[in-house]
Image: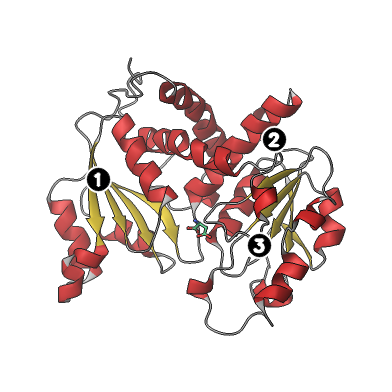
Amino acid sequence: MSGRHLLGVRDLGAEGIGEVLRLAETFEEVGRRPIPRVPALRGKTVVSAFFEDSTRTRLSFELAAKRLSADVSTFSSSSSSLNKGESLRDTVLTIEAMGVDAFVVRHACAGVPAQVAGWLSGDASVLNAGDGAHEHPTQALLDCFTLVRERRRRFGTVAAGEAVFAGLQVAIVGDIRHSRVARSCLFAFTALGASVTFVAPPTLLPPSLDGWPAEVSHDLDDVLPKCDVAYLLRLQNERMEGQYLPSLREYTATYGLTAERARLLGPSALVMHPGPIRRGVELAAEVADGPASLVTSQVASGVAVRMAVLYLLLGSGAPIGA
Ligand code: ASP
């Protein structure tokens, strides 16, 4: 991984993604030890600065930093001086002045992590933990890691090297327009050789897909039998500024992976979702909990992948440690 920050998966390319995935395998092994901790980032301080809700990403970043022996501080925007009128810039510079090595930043506005990186005067790193509808790089990285590992476990060999997803057909289904996960996954999956089809109603697609390496379909029933992976997205109501759908019921009937529709999937097809799931809306409970689902495995991969990213950005290059 070159560079000091992780702002988008787009910047990494196949080589950078491959480096993270290889290192994550090592850290996954650390996670299985009785004492799942290595001294790799001892003496480093990581601040998790989440200005938007999160369960998985925040916890797994914090756990990852702790497993690397870093000190972790949690900044909570709802109980901070932002409420007294302090600007975001002043808040960031205040935290930086305390001596911080990494900021893990989530914000409802696209571009905030890049802006934070531009404000810093020292050499702290910024890791984007999701910015508006822009990018969520570690989600895409953990999804790639999960897919590689699960395909190896279930089907034996998978293509080696940087084109590890060569020939793989991925359908990303749902609210593409407001989803940072859709963007990051598109760039990560295609960088590793997959073909991606966005499946959504026209209202839930971005106004332009110029330069996006994706096919588009409005017919989920047509796409499902042909795909190796069905990746479902939540409707991002928090980013919707109007009426995008006639009704939730109609959305589920047309674009939800219901138990009945899941029967259209091939016998070896896999189902993914970044969470949080709205069971019964975009994904039926029995499909989310069924044998094709990688949902739990995705969450489990998050810690090892975030350890890899933190180590690559903050580690001294010295051996990871016992
Ligand atoms: N957890 C993912 C995100 O933060 C997906 C979602 O919220 O639906 O973007």
Badge 2 marks a residue whose secondary structure is: helix
Rendered residue at 42%/39% (across/down): 306
Query: Is 162 positioned to the left or the right of 305 in the image?
Result: right
Q: Position of residue 303 (x, y in %)?
A: 43, 37
Badge 3 marks a residue whose secondary structure is: loop
Marks 3 and 2 sit apart, C-alpha to C-alpha, by 30 Å
Q: Position of residue 193 (x, y in %)?
A: 71, 41
Tag 1 or tag 2, which sits nearer the N-term? Answer: 1
Whether disc 1's CB lies below 8 Å from ligand 1 is answered: no
Q: Viewer-proximal residue, 258 or 85?
A: 258
Task: Name the residue beneath numbered marker 1.
Answer: 123
Quarter occupied by the C terminus: top left
Whether disc 3's CB lies below 8 Å from ligand 1 is answered: no
Nearer mark to the viewer, of 3 and 2: 3
Q: Position of residue 24 (x, y in %)?
A: 48, 30
Rendered residue at 22%/35% (across/down): 44
Residue reaching furthest front? 286
Query: On residue 267, which mark appears?
Result: none
Whether disc 2's CB lies below 8 Å from ligand 1 is answered: no
Task: Name the residue beneath numbered marker 3.
Answer: 282
Above or below — where is 170 with respect to 112? above
Amino acid type of the residue tagged 1 in the rendering: Asp
Nearer mark to the viewer, of 2 and 1: 2
Could you tell me if residue 14 is visible in this image?
no
Q: What's the coloring here?
A: secondary structure
The quadrant where residue 14 appears: top right
Tag 1 or tag 3, which sits nearer the N-term? Answer: 1
Query: On residue 163, which mark appears?
Result: 2
Above or below — where is 57 with respect to 248? above
Q: Viewer-proximal residue, 240 or 195?
A: 240
The quadrant where residue 176 appears: bottom right
